[in-house]
Image: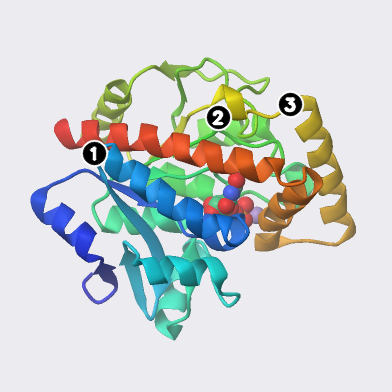
Amino acid sequence: MEKYLSYSQEVLEAKEKGLPIVALESTIISHGMPYPQNVQTAREVEQIIRDNGAVPATIAIIDGKIKIGLTDEELEMFGNADNVAKTSRRDLGYLLATKKLGATTVAATMIAAELAGIELFVTGGIGGVHRGAQNTMDISADLEELSQTNVAVVCAGAKSILDIGLTLEYLETKGVPVVGFGTDMLPAFYTRESEFSVNIRLDSAKEVADMMRAKWDLGLQGGSVIANPIPKEEAMDASFVNGIIETALVEAEENGIKGKDVTPFLLGKVKELTEGKSLEANIALVKNNARVGAAIAVELNQNK
Ligand code: PSU
Ligand code: MN
């Protein structure tokens, strides 16, 4: 793997010392948030992870290597450059071979984290089954990855640009545990609740780590969705944000947006139509996930 993996100094030292490590994705930086809030958030999230006893490893594809841990200049580059490819499972080989810049999605970050021996990954939102997927077949590769790659993913639930019910059905079929962290209801990213309940509720980092360890000890492949609700003060009004999402979906349809461009288009539209309120919520929930994720990584390091 040395041919393809390259660690930052900080992550390398953490590995040598056996410290808990938290993986972070780079698509959220390059395609999920605008500049400069993307870079600032990425830095703050890394610091929150350090402050909570773990070591951050932001993952991206640079110059034929999967980088595990980015320098400050690299973070800046990913936040600012326009030649960065959104990278999922299918793209990894191509981008490494051609030495292009790639920002890793949840799926690709999970693959990289597993290769690097990292068991926990923090992000904002995962991809899922899109509304209308009965016809479009637009189902994120993130869901397949969750079923086969051994990394626990902390997120703020599934957002209603997706069909949340079908996303849960898909995860159930694939045997992926969906955990409500301190909640009985699946959070819907911008809001603390959706109309869907989870069937596993856990209230502490240790309980999550013990669940993952038992699953992996049994040899059951795959990760889990640890759904952590956005903090109360930052949550958006459900009918307001859902109305805006409906508008964004219509615009995506009218503009013929397809494939990997769908999710970034919808996120951008929602940000525009909420006049930035969705971006504030997004930043707050990622930071909140970083706190919870670091705590779980610490526990996973103890029950190895
Ligand atoms: N949801 C968000 N922000 C994001 C993404 C999803 O709230 O940045 C990104 C993640 O990288 C996720 C990807 O893995 O979008 C899913 O893309 P797709 O739906 O094309 O699989
Ligand atoms: Mn898709």
Where residue 75 sits, quadrant-wise, is bottom left
Name the residue beneath numbered marker 1.
53
User: Between disc 2 and disc 3, whose residue precedes?
Assistant: 2
| Residue 48 appears in the figure | yes
Whole-angstrom CA distance, mark 1 to mark 3, is 33 Å
Residue 21 percent coordinates (x, y): 26, 47
State whether residue 175 appears in this view: no
Q: Position of residue 102 (x, y in %)?
A: 48, 71
Residues at circles 1 and 2 in contact by the CB criterion of under 8 Å:
no
Which of the two labelled residues, at mark 1 and mark 3, occupies the earlier sequence position?
1
Q: Is residue 99 above or below residue 222?
A: below
In the figure, residue 8 lies in which quadrant?
bottom left
Q: Quadrant of ligand 2?
A: bottom right
The N terminus appears in which quarter of the rendering? bottom left
Task: Look at 30% across and 21% down and name the residue there.
Answer: 207
Can you tell which mark lies on residue 230?
2
User: Which residue does the numbered mark 3 point to in the structure image?
Assistant: 237
Please identify the residue farthest to the left as the structure is shown. 17
User: What amino acid type is highlighted by mark number 1?
Assistant: Gly
Instruction: Answer few, some or many: residues within 10 Å of disc 3's Cα (few below 14, many 20 plus, some between 14 and 19).
Output: few
Q: How many marks?
A: 3
